[in-house]
Amino acid sequence: MTMQMSRRGKEYLETAQSLLRAARTMTDMAVAARLEMLANDYQRRAEKASSVDAARSSARSAGTRYESYL
């Protein structure tokens, strides 16, 4: 199943990509490794944010349909 990235997820993903670009330019390997770990964390946040946002959107639309029957 392919999930579409939410706006919040896209922002996290953009931050992750920026961190990876910065990590590639680092000459200090310790700093580069920390930036890569941080970028991975932001990628996980992007996935989680999109999942949560999709679930909230589904819940809202289900609630809206339910209310229309009242």
Image (cartoon, helix red, strand yellow):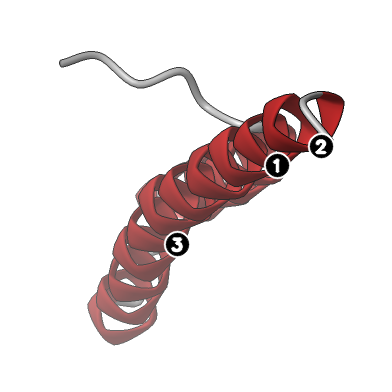
In terms of image quadrants, where is residue 60? top right
Number of other residues with Cα within 10 Å of mark 1, as a class: few under 14, some 14 to 19, many 20 or more: few
Under tag 3, what secondary structure?
helix
Residue 12, x across and y down, in percent: 60, 50
Location of mark 2 (residue): 67
Label 1 with label 3: CB-CB less than 8 Å: no
Left or right side of 6 for 39: left
| Image quarter in which the C terminus is found | top right
Say which of 31 and 36 sits in front.
36
Label 2 with label 1: CB-CB less than 8 Å: yes
**Mark with earlier residue (2, 3):** 3
User: Cα distance, mark 1 to mark 3?
Assistant: 26 Å
Q: Which mark is residue 14?
A: none
**Mark with earlier residue (1, 3):** 3
Residue 33, x across and y down, in percent: 25, 74
Under tag 2, what secondary structure?
helix
Tag 2: amino acid: Glu
Q: Which mark is residue 45?
A: 3
Label 2 with label 3: CB-CB less than 8 Å: no
Say which residue appears at 45% left-offset and 62% top-offset. Answer: 45
